[in-house]
Amino acid sequence: MACAPHGLADGLPDLGEVERTALSVAAERRLGERIMLEIRRDPAYLDDAEVADYLGRLGGRLAAHVEGARPAFEFFAVRDPMLNAFALPGGFIGVHTGLILAARNESELAGVLAHEIVHVTQSHLARMLGAQNQGQLWSMLALAAAILAAKSHPDVAMGAAVAGQAAGIQNQLNYSRDFEREADRLGLELLERAGFDPRGMASFFERLWQFGRLYENNAPAYLRTHPLTTERITDMENRLARRPYRQVPDSADFVFIRAKLRAQEGTPAQAVAEFVAQLTTKQYPFEAAARFGLAHALLRAGRVPEAEAECMRLAEWETKSALVAGLMGAVLRAKGDAKNAVLRLAAARASFPDSKPLLYALIDAQIAAGRAGEAERLAREEALATPGDARLWRLLARAAAEGGHKGGERRAMAEAYVLEGRLDEAIRQLELAREAGGDYFEQSQIDARLAELRRRRQEEAKERSPWR
């Protein structure tokens, strides 16, 4: 999971080799999956395919420039107005919607993701535990609980983190500062290699710092979990002074995603009023994004004909942005016109063949249009091509259920559960699939997968036993 450590640079402390005295790479990933299982159950978890896809593409662009080995990152959003982001064990990175909306440009948002990516690639969580000789699982789980609590109660969260680890508070904070400086330095380099403006990280962090100074008792949550000092700000500014200025335009998806998130805030009526006011006064950075946000707000308010009218005004963007094409499909679904939604979404996939949200929307529309057989074939083909997509396996399970294929439904759900770290439930689904019957070939596949998952469950239980 960790990339090769970078050498001493610009007077920063040498943090040494990336230690793994606390957790192995595989154990850290499994721990991350267990934490994500809890996060996905939290009402604040934003289960939005388009937002997750955007963050995944933005984060993936950065991760592609990580030097050396890198983990399989997964980026997700948490519906929370607090400005925060966090890295979990195993490559899971969460971002609060409030932070996405607070970013003034895409490079600022990318700067936060780059910083969190470095926390993962440099194994900062594992190294912090290693430095304190804290190999016990309960220590890491206490830290995970603190991260989760930070969504709403950052002060309580920091207390939980300290209480959960029997180590000197000052030593922990000192390590944290060193890790933050390392994440700043390597994050700036990563941001630049990925083609973003490295000043985005510095400008966003400085704005957070200034806000924290003005409202010390209500500082952004990000500053509570990522201590920021004048020394760090100065250090970033000194590094940037040696770099030439580069202007990097925002992607259309950045402004569309922000508009969609804004349309989900407050009541539906308030969201509609906000975008109407923007369009009336022409107080918007990008008219298409304001109309996109208004259409989403109108859909949320159940005003489907008006949402469709706004979509018509966005027609020129349908072949330029998968997000706009997906909005067109959503409006048709809301009208109850699943048949035309299928046609529209199938055509959109020709323009955006790599868009997962469009694929999900198409399969969903096919099921709604009574074309479960087509949906099942498409979902199975795509799930086999990209087996790490839990949402796709769930859609396959839905399509199989709609087509009356009970065994296929159970097997698809089992794969979704495996990806979500829910091994016991996956095994139960396969046992039910076996009871549902099938030919010799199908039964053999189920038996082989069952044996594999049962072995994995035993190995994980064995791995956890020394920590109890």
Image (tube, rainbow, N blue to C red):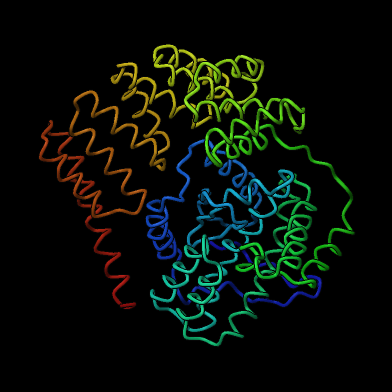
Residue 190 position, x and y percent, is: 70, 54
Q: Quadrant of the C terminus?
A: bottom left
The residue at the point 50 percent across, 50 percent down is 74
Total label count? Answer: 0
Snapshot quadrant of residue 318 = top right
Residue 89 vertical placement versus 142 (above, below): above
The residue at the point 40 percent across, 51 percent down is 40
Residue 425 vertical placement versus 144 (above, below): above
Compared across the picture, whether 333 is left or right of 264 comes to left
The residue at the point 52 percent across, 60 percent down is 151
The residue at the point 63 percent across, 53 percent down is 113
347 or 369, nearer to the observer: 369
1 or 232, nearer to the observer: 232
Compared across the picture, whether 12 is left or right of 422 comes to right
Residue 170 position, x and y percent, is: 61, 85
Compared across the picture, whether 244 is left or right of 223 comes to right
Residue 249 position, x and y percent, is: 78, 37
Snapshot quadrant of residue 16 = bottom right
Residue 268 position, x and y percent, is: 53, 34
Compared across the picture, whether 148 is left or right of 401 comes to right
